[in-house]
Image: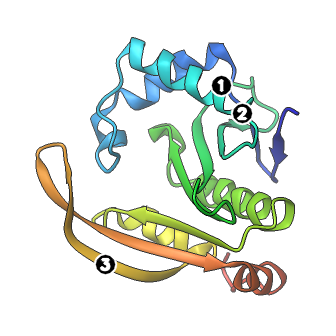
Amino acid sequence: MRLELATERLILREMIPEDWRAFYDIHREPAVVRYLTQDVATEDSAREYVERAIASAREEPRLTFDLAITERGGNGELVGRCGLRRKDSEPRIGEIWYVLSPACVGRGYATEAARAMLRLAFAELALHRIYADVDPRNLRSIRVLERIGMRREAHFVQDVWIKGEWCDTMMLGILAHEYHRVAVHPRAGD
């Protein structure tokens, strides 16, 4: 089954082999990967990442949904990625993430894509809980997560070694019943 999620301005679709070039163009930028555990992409690492995303779509049971973000009505080129990974130990709990091309930042695409992933998680997969971990310095990402109804749950101090430094982690989460309340009654300005 090929998964495709449509929003007002975006199509989130399964990755295809040709996506590696756009993936590379986005992930080779130090500012894009600053808060990610991955380093700046090489052509080889971009190809490998896309190959892994394609392979994960065929796994049974499927635990990882790593989708290309494309603009609706555009040329279908990847402008970012958004994902959901269910935990092996408890598949009713999942983690979401998103990465956008710098050219698309500030347009609300991350919020739109993340909302689509929550809809997949709660309305389609009937998950119980979704969480995201984020570097607390990444204020834009925290705002996106809060905008989609996630709440701050924890702040771990210097709990992970990334790119030569100890970094903090902020955890945000949302439960299914909270999502359904937010989805029915969104906050003003969203």
Residue 55, numbered circle: 1
Q: Position of residue 22 (x, y in %)?
A: 54, 22
> As shown in the figure, which amino acid type bears the numbered disc 3?
His
Is 34 positioned to the left or the right of 47 in the image?
left
Mark with earlier residue (2, 3): 2
Asked if 46 appears above or below 78 in the picture, the reply is above
| Frontmost residue, 172 versus 108 | 172
Check disc 3: other Cα within 10 Å, few if <14, some if 14-19, many if 20+: some
Pointers 2 and 3 in contact (C-beta within 8 Å): no
Label 3: which residue? 155
The answer to whether mark 2 and mark 1 are in CB contact below 8 A is yes
Report x, y in % for residue 33: 34, 40
Q: Nearer the viewer, mark 2 or mark 3?
A: 2
For the C terminus, the image quarter is bottom right
Q: CA distance from mark 2 to mark 1?
A: 7 Å
Cα distance, mark 2 to mark 3? Answer: 33 Å
Which residue does the image show at 84% across and 83% down from the upper left?
184
Q: Residue at x 40, y 19 (%)?
A: 45
